[in-house]
Image (cartoon, coloured by chain):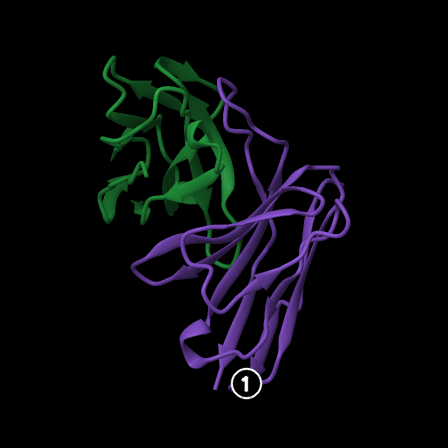
Amino acid sequence: LAKTTQPISMDSYEGQEVNITCSHNNIATNDYITWYQQFPSQGPRFIIQGYKTKVTNEVASLFIPADRKSSTLSLPRVSLSDTAVYYCLVGEATSGTYKYIFGTGTRLKVLA
Amino acid sequence: EAQVTQNPRYLITVTGKKLTVTCSQNMNHEYMSWYRQDPGLGLRQIYYSMNVEVTDKGDVPEGYKVSRKEKRNFPLILESPSPNQTSLYFCASSRVMGQGNSNQPQHFGDGTRLSIL
C-alpha cells in the first residue's frame, strides 16, 4: 500500500505562501495524488488533484516531481481562514481494491 | 444540493448495544466509503463499496459491518460496540475510479461522533 507521510504541523502568517510536502514512496503507476482540507467539525473537502508535473486551480497548486515519490501542495497568500488540517491521499486503484490511504494530515495554523 | 447525510451526528451508548449509523448520498455515486478519525491517526478506511451489493474491507474493518442494498445508502453497523470504537466517523461518496483514471474526488458527510461507554 502506498503510505503517505506529511509534517504534523506548520505555522504561517497571513499573506505568505505555504508549501506542504507529502511523501509517498510506494505510489503505483496509475495512482493520482489528491489533497483535501478539513476544518473542525466538518468532513474533508477536495482541494486539488494531479498525476505529474504541475496542476493549478483557483485555490492551490500541486507540484509533483518526475519520480512521483512526493508532492507539494502550495497555497498562495494564505489567510486566517486557511487554518485547517490538510491531507494528502493516494489511491489504490491499480490493485483493483480501490482502497484509499490518507496521511495523518498537516495542521496548518495561519497567524495574523 | 449535492450532499452526503449521516445520522445520527452524535451518539453515546454502552458496550454491546448494537447500533447503526446511516449514510445517504443524492449524487448517484457508485462508490461509497466509511472512515474513522482518531487523534494522531488521521483518517482510516473501514469499508468501501464499489456499487450495489459490492463491498470490501478497508484498513480497519474489525468490529464493523456494512451493507449496500441501494445505491444511495451505505449504513455502518456495529453489532457489539466496544469502547475502542469510540471515534469520529465519516461517510464519503464519489464516482467510480478505474485503472488509468483519476481518483474521483470524494464528498464527505459532516461526521458522526460515537462514544461507547
Shown in purple, the chain is B
B33 relative to A34, above or below: below
Query: Relative to B2, is B38 on the left or the right?
Result: left
Q: Which chain is green?
A: A
Q: Residue at x 40, y 25 (%)?
A: A31
The residue lying toward the viewer, choosing from B81 and A77, is B81
Kindly indicate the quadrant of the structure image that contains residue B110.
Answer: bottom right
- Could you say where residue B98 lies in the image, as x and y percent from the top left? 54, 25
Q: Residue at x 55, y 29 (%)?
A: B104
Identified at 28% across, 39% down, the residue is: A4
- Give the camera-side residue of B106 and A2: A2
Residue at the (75%, 47%) spot, across then down: B72
Side of A7 where A1 appears, left or right: right
* Image-quadrant location for residue B26: top right
Q: Residue B111's spot in the image, x, y percent?
A: 56, 59
Quadrant, the N terminus of chain A = top left
Which chain letter matches label 1? B
How packed is label 1: few (under 14 Cα within 10 Å), some, or many (20 or more)?
Answer: some
Q: Relative to residue B5, is residue B11 drawn left or right?
A: left
- The residue that disc 1 covers is B16
Element type at marker 1?
Answer: loop
Quarter where residue B38 is shown? bottom left
The percent coordinates of residue A64 (x first, y second) are: 30, 19
